[in-house]
Image (spheres, helix red, strand yellow):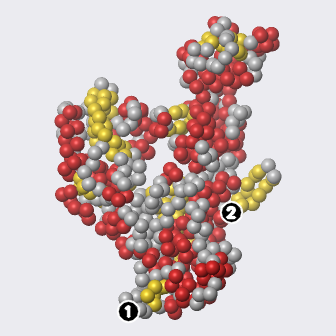
Amino acid sequence: MPADVDVLVAELRKFGAEATAVEVKRAAGGLPKSARETLSSFSNTPGGGTLVLGLDEASGFAAIGLEDPAKMMADLASMCREDMVPPLMPEIEIAEVDGRPILVADIPELAKEQKPCYVRSLGKERGSYIRVGESDRRLTSEEVQQVVADRGQPQFDHEIVSDATLDDLDRAAVDAYISRMRENNPRIFADEPAEVVLRMTKVIVRGAKGEEHPTMAGVLALGRYPQQFFPQLNVTFVHYPTATGESTQAGVRFLDNVSLDGPIPAMVAEAMTVIRRNMSRRALITGEGRRDMWEYPPEALREAVVNALVHRDLSPGSRGIQVQIEMYPDRLRIMNPGGLFGAVNIDRLGEEGRSSARNSLLMKLLEDVQVPDEDRTVCENRGSGIRAMISVLRQAGMSPPRFKDSTTAFEVMLPNHTLLDDETVAWLQLLGREGLRDSQCTGLALMRRGEVMDNAKYRAATGITDSRVATFELQDLVARELVAQTGTRGGARYTLSEYAETAHVRGRRARPNRRRQVLDLLALHRELSKSEISELLGLNPKTAEHWLRTLKGEGSVEPTQPGRGSKHTKYRLSAKAMQESLFGDPDL
């Protein structure tokens, strides 16, 4: 449940419903039936969401109130118990906004083994929904099957491809695979015949009549042409000339349009070739001089392509969906069917020790299958791919990837821009980079591009692994009046302050000289506490604390009593400050 309804409403009015995972309904005539769809969608969507009754989105989320909030609460609780399968037990509370009663219900995401949540009267196939943007979308029958399959460890990559034989495997790739297995695991495989190695590693299995057939994993990893059995298990690449994907005025619809077939190792290699021929190079200016780099670092692209191919959903309902790569002037998107699997979510992607494989057999095989013409295997199977992708982009001075998990699909989006370009560096200089860490500059640059930060996003963007360090750095930016905070604790969000947003227009002098103000106040009042300075200057207490800490560090102020500071500690000008007459210098 949101800790502060006023904060929730403020976020709605500032960011909108889509950015806050909130569904708002007027509910002027009673509990709307469409609330069932929202209950289903939030229960099935990563992160869940919040249902608010009694606000009018069309009027800027104005409070219209509820005639009988207690009855509305009882009706909503009954709907959750009686109309939904499985029954839901959200936290519901009556709150007051602008003097009028509203209802706020927090709908948590269900555990995987309980999904999908559906409307009882419509049945599982027609009554299961998922959240897409600001709307509830009904899951297709195939998507429902995907969700059900994800309740346990999927075994689709273990399936026997009954139409395939050993002749449908690539002999050269198979020989290289067997050699590698014997070399890396001599105790197990050194003396075993080739077919036994393939059988032990489940590249092939015996059918009901004793005949040998490749598994789906075997065909995808080592097959000559897997698409003869699974025509859509391939990769499509489209290069659009416009950011919207529309044709140009001259009628050009695509700059490139390719369908890539073959086993996964070949598709990885060919996808990289196609992307490279559609990329330009750009200059990156570093302390070591100028470096020419690709628009997108190849290593980051490779990790994204591999992840899409090896983690895609292989259930029957998804075998008609390709892995899609779309290039636009300002971004590159890589999409695959099947959302995140296992104990992994968007906020924790890339964390050390966080790895979960939907296609465990396929991943295991590809760990020992080489990419054509490369001295490397397709994947390491160590859960390090996302971390490597983020690290490479950070080293290239680029924004981190953006991930989108919709339970039945997953998307990686790479923005096509240098994060700390000349314009952004000049803007940071206007803000005053003194004392800022590189990670804070990265966070500010992302917020300047419209990102709404929280602790998890900040850590992903900067490479910080400790949430406490991230909190300290974000709070320091708040104290410096460069960032505005909405919400508290786990719900805190950070955006640029008004001063930071307009610094490029007004210049650095537009910000009040807080240092001078604090010194003048202490000269006038002789002794003041942090809270008194905050109140007199109308500052965030963290800002007052920041300047007292800064002035104390340089020897301009001192506590009136020795010992550890507290909110009641009083401060005064130091003898040094009095002697040097700091007040007359307009730059202070």
CA gap between label 2 and label 1 equals: 53 Å
Q: Residue 17 at what x, y percent from top left?
A: 39, 43
Q: Amino acid at mark 2?
A: Trp
**Looking at the image, residue 6 lies above or below residue 351:** above
Q: Crowdedness of circle 2 by 10 Å Cα count: few (<14), some, many (20+)?
A: some
Q: Which residue is mark 2?
A: 294
Nearer the observer, 285 or 303: 303
Q: Which residue is mark 1?
A: 209
Residue under the point 47% across and 54% down: 345
- Of all residues, the one furthest to the top in this rendering is 525
Ranked by sequence position, the earlier of labels 2 and 1 is 1
Q: Residue 300 at what x, y percent from top left?
A: 62, 62
Locate the N terminus by quadrant.
Answer: top left
Position of 319 with respect to 251 (left or right) is left
**Looking at the image, residue 585 lies above or below residue 50:** above
Q: Residue 104 at what x, y percent from top left?
A: 31, 37
